[in-house]
Amino acid sequence: MTGTLTWRAMSDNQSVDPKTLLTEALRLSPEERAALAGELIDSLETDIDPDAEAAWSGEIRARVAQLDAGTAKTISSPEARRRIHAAAGRGPQP
């Protein structure tokens, strides 16, 4: 990541205030924030279930095939976000 975070090197016994870290991370470009989010999520996944990985791979292949065939119904990114937030109870319901 080539971002603008300007953290000094820290020893193991020092901690970073999460709010400060978030404030700094939000200054990154969208691409850098996405990469950081991916790294953070990966750091939580210590036990990988091979069956779940295979199922997700199959689902991804099926969805890509639907997109390629023109049979998938797509929605805009803002609409997808609205639906996700509504389903999570974080926004107006449809």
Image: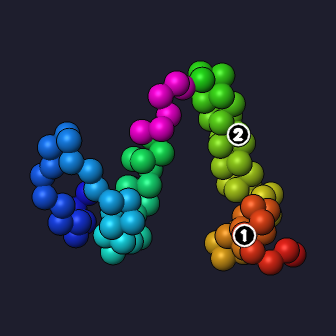
Residue holding disc 2? 59
Q: Residue at x 59, y 21 (%)?
A: 50
Q: Nearer the viewer, residue 20 or 6?
A: 20
**Dot 1 amino acid type:** Arg
Q: Position of residue 24 (x, y in %)?
A: 31, 70
Circle 1: is it few (<14), some (14-19), or many (20+) Cα within 10 Å? few
Q: Residue at x 20, y 41 (%)?
A: 13
Range drawn in magenta: 43-48
> Distance between the Cα atoms at labels 2 and 1?
27 Å
Circle 2: is it few (<14), some (14-19), or many (20+) Cα within 10 Å? few
Give the residue furthest to the front.
13
Q: Quadrant of residue 31?
A: bottom left
Dot 1 falls on a residue whose secondary structure is: loop
Q: Nearer the viewer, residue 72 or 27?
A: 27
Mark sitting earlier along the chain (2/1): 2
Q: Is residue 1 magenta?
A: no
Q: Position of residue 64 (x, y in %)?
A: 66, 49
Q: Is residue 20 above or below residue 38?
A: below
The mark found on residue 90 in the picture is: 1
Q: Residue at x 39, y 66 (%)?
A: 19
